[in-house]
Amino acid sequence: KAGVTQTPRYLIKTRGQQVTLSCSPISGHRSVSWYQQTPGQGLQFLFEYFSETQRNKGNFPGRFSGRQFSNSRSEMNVSTLELGDSALYLCASSVQSGANVLTFGAGSRLTVL
Amino acid sequence: GESVGLHLPTLSVQEGDNSIINCAYSNSASDYFIWYKQESGKGPQFIIDIRSNMDKRQGQRVTVLLNKTVKHLSLQIAATQPGDSAVYFCAESSMEYGNKLVFGAGTILRVKS
């Protein structure tokens, strides 16, 4: 059974650009959550999608957005990139929404120059 | 704000010894707790979870203890192996947090051979 797949694994952008990250959950998992991981802030929750609907949202500015498709694949977008957006972006999937085990992907490492 | 755990302390143990990783959580209403292990270059990997109606749960070589009175969670690893070297995160979840996982800062475990 394939795990959570995130693409791209690494990318470099410059300030002001935008970026789109993709996540394919485990087959049968309908919930996808996104986290930002930085050395200073640790793992911070961005948002969760379930059945194409945003179920929960963290305390990030509106530059961070996401969506989920009918096949449960999800994308997140960051517009007008800032240096502080450099981070590892982790996607995690689970069978259902709510308090349960999340299976994480390896992450997308974003560097903003 | 939402916060769980310590600020990346380091625990060094000798191979074969038992390890105990501690975590203090902040929300007395949290009802679900989970431990993850993250190795370099990888996403967090599920270790064990526990719900608030239990105070102990055992897995293979791991035990999680929950003390709700003092809001403390611990992960015990028996016969620690070099492959256990990683960063360990605890996380909590509650309806107050919208049932999303709120992660602690993590603890580095170093196993000496």
Image (cartoon, rainbow, N blue to C red):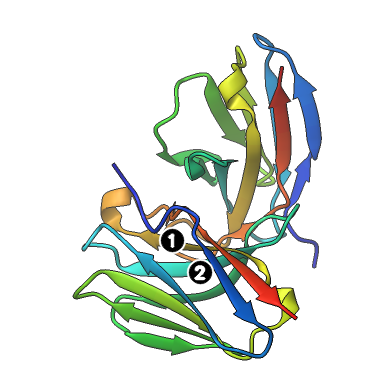
* Kind of element beneath mark 2: strand
Labels 2 and 1 touching (C-beta < 8 A): yes
Q: Is residue A8 visible?
A: no
- Crowding around mark 2 (Cα neighbors within 10 Å: few <14, some 14 to 19, many 20+) is many
Residue identifier under label 1:
B91
* Letter of the chain that mark 1 sits on in the rendering: B
Residue drawn at point x = 41 percent, y = 71 percent: B22
Residue B102 spot, x, y in % from top left: 41, 53
Residue B62 spot, x, y in % from top left: 55, 85
Picture quadrant where residue A15 is located? top right
- Crowding around mark 1 (Cα neighbors within 10 Å: few <14, some 14 to 19, many 20+) is many
* Kind of element beneath mark 1: strand
Residue identifier under label 2:
B35
Residue drawn at point x = 75 percent, y = 52 percent: B41
Q: Quadrant of the C terminus of chain B?
A: bottom right
Q: Is residue A93 visible?
A: yes
Q: Respond whether the residues carrying marks 2 and 1 are from the same subunit.
A: yes
Picture quadrant where residue A94 is located? bottom right
Q: Say left or right for B89 vs A57.
A: right
Q: Is residue A70 above or below residue A93?
A: above
Residue A111 spot, x, y in % from top left: 72, 27
Disc 1 residue type (three-letter): Ala
Label number found at residue B41: none
* Letter of the chain that mark 2 sits on in the rendering: B
